[in-house]
């Protein structure tokens, strides 16, 4: 993966890259869980529809499930790249966004019901993550 061109001493650009990589990685991780659940649901539906259990493929051979595995590998790699550019304390707080992405993907793709408590929780999580991004000091000190 090509590293962005960050001039020496320009920490704000490196911080923006780190946030972008980390949030994108978290999204891919959340997407992977949704894809894997879709794969499991498809295998289960096929098994219930089939008269003989011999013709049903195992879940780990399902294309959606395999795409979920690829997505979790890509997402984890993006998170590692993001952690290389930014303050790890600040970026660790962004991992809570996984719950937000999981909820949104479950409602949009899996057609699950969104409750009022989900909306309140998403609002609190987003505001807490944004507060951490702004209030965590981005100074790297080297201790020897």
Image: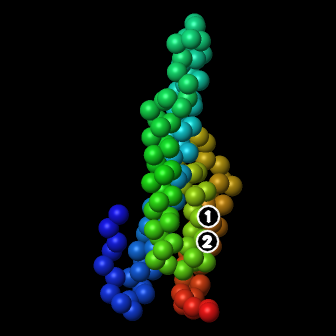
Return the residue nearer the eye: 78 or 43. 78
Residue bearing the label numbered 2: 93
Location of the N terminus (image quadrant) = bottom left
SS at mark 1 in the image: helix
User: In the rendering, at what x and y percent does residue 26 appear?
Assistant: 52, 59
Identify the image quadrant of residue 120: bottom right
Please name the colour scheme applied to the rendered image.
rainbow
Q: Is residue 108 visible?
A: no
Pointer 1 local density, CA inside 10 Å: few below 14, some 14–19, many at least 20: some
Asked if residue 129 is positioned above or below residue 65 in the image, the reply reads below
SS at mark 2 in the image: helix
Residue 64 circle label: none
Figure label count: 2
User: In the rendering, at what x and y percent does residue 113 appear?
Assistant: 61, 42
The residue that appears at 61% across and 61% down in the rendered structure is: 122
Which residue reaches farthest top? Answer: 51
The residue that appears at 58% across and 58% down in the rendered structure is: 98
The residue that appears at 65% across and 49% down in the rendered structure is: 115
Pointer 2 local density, CA inside 10 Å: few below 14, some 14–19, many at least 20: some
Identify the image quadrant of residue 135: bottom right
Location of the C terminus (image quadrant) = bottom right
Which residue reaches farthest right? Answer: 117
Residue bearing the label numbered 1: 96
Q: In this view, does 76 lie to the left or right of 121?
A: left
User: In the rendering, at what x and y percent does residue 54 appear?
Assistant: 56, 11
Asked if residue 87 is positioned above or below residue 27 in the image, the reply reads below
Q: Do the residues labelled 2 and 1 touch (CB within 8 Å)?
A: yes
């Amino acid at each position: 993966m090509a590293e962005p061109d960050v001039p020496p001493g320009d920490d704000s650009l490196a911080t923006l890259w780190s946030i972008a990589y980390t949030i994108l990685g978290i999204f891919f991780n959340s997407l992977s869980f949704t894809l894997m659940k879709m794969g499991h649901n498809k295998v289960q539906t096929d098994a219930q529809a089939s008269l003989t259990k011999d013709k049903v493929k195992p879940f780990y051979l399902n294309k959606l499930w395999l795409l979920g595995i690829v997505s979790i590998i890509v997402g984890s790699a993006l998170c590692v790249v993001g952690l290389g550019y930014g303050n790890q304390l600040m970026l660790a707080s962004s991992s809570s966004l996984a719950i937000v992405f999981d909820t949104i993907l479950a409602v949009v793709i899996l057609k699950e019901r969104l409750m009022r408590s989900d909306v309140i929780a998403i609002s609190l999580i987003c505001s807490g993550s944004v507060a951490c991004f702004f209030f965590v000091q981005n100074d790297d000190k080297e201790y020897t």
